[in-house]
């Protein structure tokens, strides 16, 4: 019913923190029927750490499908994990996020059952109030179950790469229309003509309790600074590759 898709690099200590936090705070990940679909790009440590990554994943998931490309390329990593999933729902989890407190996954899934148009619910790096949740300079509004992206903003902030539950058909439809020479997240926007109709047809939101602090934290940026890596290119939001700064 649900697959977990993950893009990862040679950062076992980061991956361990991520999986530990999600298995502690999101009960659904403990379901033995879940399959992890992971791409491990050769970026990070000075030597191949993919064996360590696989061992960590095997400690958490009974079934793990793995891709280990020879060249690191973020869009290709996303394409591989998405096109190798066939489940009705996809939990997309990049390797460098912590879930900060317990979340009700059953309620999260129920949001999709209640609303067939809902394509994407993500956790939030911003705190929420009683009625709104900030997303960059935009605000989602509480609809009784989650904070919903306004229709006028769907093409700007509707979907993003934060840890999220997604309708599998939507993800695979987007993947079929993408140019995987470009950053995938930025293509799930209205200004890409082939994807615009998919955005128009669906709803998007943030899953966080009202009046709550952020429920996820990015733990990858500190690692990149400490280990002299950065996203390549002038516009980091459109990155496709990494580069060493040392």
Image (cartoon, rainbow, N blue to C red):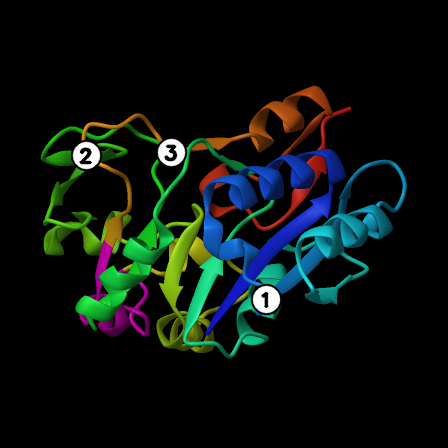
Q: Which corner quadrant of the image does residue 44 belong to?
A: top right
Look at the numbered disc 2 and give the secondary structure of its residue.
loop
| Local crowd size for mark 3, using a 10 Å CA cut-off: few (<14), some (14–19), many (≥20) | many
Quadrant holding the C terminus: top right
Residues in magenta?
190-204
Magenta segment includes 202:
yes
Q: Give whichever of 67, 189 is nearer the camera.
A: 67
The answer for how far apart the CA atoms under marks 1 and 2 are is 32 Å
Residue 222 visible to an observer of this rendering: yes
Q: Give whichever of 212, 106 is nearer the camera.
A: 106
Direction from residue 88 to residue 65 in the image, left or right: right
Task: Tell me residue 23's x, y (percent).
Answer: 55, 45
Image vertical order of residue 229 relative to residue 16, above or below: above
| Local crowd size for mark 1, using a 10 Å CA cut-off: few (<14), some (14–19), many (≥20) | many
Residue 235 visible to an observer of this rendering: no
The residue singled out by tag 2 in the image is 210
């Amino acid at each position: 019913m649900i697959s977990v898709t993950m893009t990862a690099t040679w950062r076992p200590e980061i991956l361990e923190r991520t999986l530990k936090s999600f298995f502690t705070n999101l009960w659904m990940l403990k379901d033995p029927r879940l399959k992890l679909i992971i791409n491990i790009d050769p970026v990070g440590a000075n030597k191949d750490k993919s064996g360590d990554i696989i061992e960590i994943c095997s400690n958490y998931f009974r079934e793990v499908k793995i891709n280990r490309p020879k060249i690191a390329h973020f869009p290709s990593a996303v394409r591989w994990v998405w096109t190798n999933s066939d489940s009705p729902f996809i939990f997309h989890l990049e390797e460098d996020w912590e879930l900060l407190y317990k979340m009700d996954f059953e309620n999260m899934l129920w949001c999709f059952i209640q609303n067939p148009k809902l394509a994407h619910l993500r956790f939030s790096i911003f705190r929420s109030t009683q009625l709104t949740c900030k997303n960059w300079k935009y605000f989602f509004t509480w609809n009784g179950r989650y904070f919903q992206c306004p229709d006028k903003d769907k093409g700007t902030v509707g979907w993003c790469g934060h840890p999220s539950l997604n309708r599998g058909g939507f993800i695979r439809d987007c993947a079929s229309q993408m140019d995987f020479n470009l950053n995938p997240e930025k293509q799930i926007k209205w200004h890409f003509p082939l994807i615009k109709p998919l955005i128009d047809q669906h709803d998007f939101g943030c899953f966080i309790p009202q009046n709550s602090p952020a429920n996820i934290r990015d733990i990858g940026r500190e690692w990149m600074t400490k280990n002299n890596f950065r996203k390549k290119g002038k516009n980091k939001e459109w990155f496709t590759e990494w580069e060493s700064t040392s």
